[in-house]
Amino acid sequence: ASGGAGAGAGTPPVHEQRPPRLGRASKQDKGAPAEPYTEQDCVEVLDILRGQLQLDAEVPVAAFVIVERCVQAAKSKRFLTADTWKPILITATILAAKTWFDERIWLVDVRHQLRGYFDLEHLGRHEADMCKLIQFRFNVGPKNFYEYYFALRDLGRKKIEQQQQQQPEFRRSGHRRASR
């Protein structure tokens, strides 16, 4: 055995291994399929990001615009998957915040504020991939912003209406006076 042997034959040392590219499942992820994601999963991630990073309500709207631009630019149905949706949403939200606030947001600060919530090991790589993919087109004009804003608002209203329809009618039956 030579003194320079790594963990396994043909496996580069950890510092030489490249992080997975944005929009592609890593080799580790291919073994077990990820759970499908729901609207509620997206809402929970955005709630954590907004709370921990103290983002304005407009930033997630801009993030969705950026995500759609990435999906369109990738021209791949495998770009946004159960394995990739969360890093894509987190990265888009951080880039939207940088654009919205028009100030420097350091990734080291983001990692610190989101420590314990998300795996952000490859955030810098994901950010670079997203910048390259949509050629730094992060600015969201007013018309585009409001199209997304009203579409997301309408989607939220429909979701609330659906939830109300699925709930038992305890309000009507529970508060009626008994007739004698």
Image (cartoon, rainbow, N blue to C red):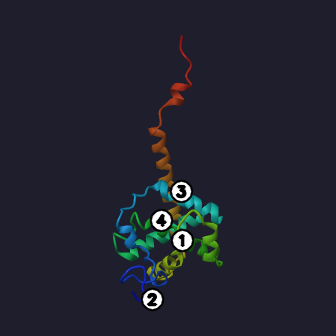
**Residue picked out by circle 1:** 120
How far is mark 3 from mark 1, CA to CA? 17 Å
Q: Percent from the top left, x then y, of residue 71?
A: 40, 71
Judged by depth in the image, the label closer to the viewer, 2 or 4, is 2
Nearest to N terminus: mark 1 or mark 4: 4
Nearest to N terminus: mark 4 or mark 3: 3
Judged by depth in the image, the label closer to the viewer, 3 or 2, is 2
Q: Tag 2: Cα neighbours inside 10 Å, few (<14), some, or many (≥20)?
A: few
Nearest to N terminus: mark 3 or mark 1: 3
Amino acid type, callout 2:
Gly
Q: Residue placed farthest to the top in the image?
A: 180
Residue 31 is marked as none
Residue 3 is marked as 2
Residue 86 is marked as 4
State left or right for residue 8 relative to residue 65: left
Q: Percent from the top left, x then y, of residue 110?
A: 61, 71
State left or right for residue 138 relative to residue 78: right
Amino acid type, callout 4:
Lys
**Judging from the image, what secondary structure is the residue with disc 1 in?**
loop
How far is mark 1 from mark 4, CA to CA? 11 Å
